[in-house]
Amino acid sequence: MLTSIRGIVAASLLAGCGLAATPALADEMDPPSDITVSGNAALVTDYRFRGVSLSNGNIAIQGGIDIGHSSGFYVGTWGSSLTSGAYGAIELDIYGGWSGDIADGVSADIGVLYYAYPDGISGADLDYVEFYGSLGFAFGPADASVGVAYAPDQDSLGDQDNLYVYLDLGAGIPDTPISVSAHLGYTDGVLAPDLLAGGPDDSGFDWSIGADFAVTDNLSVGVAYIGTEGASVKNFTDDAVVGTLSVSF
């Protein structure tokens, strides 16, 4: 299904570009395309999602492709390797939405995301849908964003819902290739860290602090300290230091 979706999108892009394969003279006369395609790939020492490890403390390979339009609308897909008995070895996410500036120094992002686990336990209903929105604020070399993600009642969540709210802060250190970041999130619902770890609390915080070093414009390395509130299970909800090697293209 994912391959089919990508094929449809690719065909639409070619149709929209129209003269993309025509002689150079025609290309020179065409205005710049309203469509942009970008990609990313990463190697992480542990796949942590809202503080919880989905790779059992093991290395994970991740990557994604995004297709954006000048209007602000976008679609994309992202995947990661997993180490999970129930969810299998692969997570594939499909998402779409709109992002753009709504005021000077203020941006917005809204959309819907589908989490898929194609090789999970046979017959199990594991995939789920989440709606998200955020506001971003730029302050010179620093930025901040506040966001919310809501997964409504659905079979894969045991007919329960989940609410996640978060605050992200980031800043580049002037005249250096180094940036620092901090994150604080709060879960209320079936995906709370303590509940996932076997505890009784269906709400709780997660947090992280980190730094990234831009090796080139497209290559960076990073390290982050990540933790959660509630029961601490080794290689699952315990605090961890996570390293990242990422590339964009």
Image: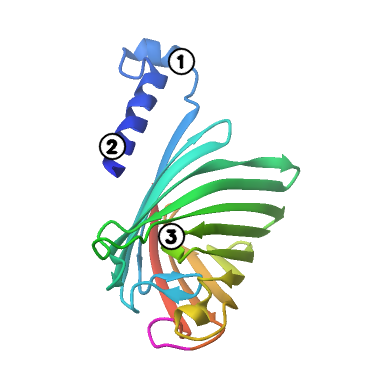
Report the residue marked by disc 1. Answer: 30
Question: Between residues 107 and 86, which one lies in front from this camera angle?
Answer: 86
Q: Earlier in the sequence, mark 3 or mark 1?
A: 1
Q: Are marks 3 and 2 in contact (CB under 8 Å)?
A: no
| Residue kind at label 3, given as amino acid type | Asp
Look at the image and say whether residue 235 sits in the magenta stretch: yes
Pointer 2 residue: 4
Q: Quadrant of the N terminus?
A: top left
**Residue type marked 2:** Ser
Q: Nearer the viewer, mark 3 or mark 2?
A: 3
Q: Which comes before the other along the chain, label 3 or label 2?
A: 2
The nearer-to-camera label among 3 and 1 is: 3
Q: Is residue 36 magenta?
A: no
Gap between marks 2 and 1 measured at Cα: 29 Å
Residue 165 picture quarter: bottom right
Image point 32% across, 59% down: which residue?
Answer: 117
Q: Which residue is mark 3?
A: 155
CB-based contact (under 8 Å), mark 2 and mark 1? no
Label 3: element kind: helix
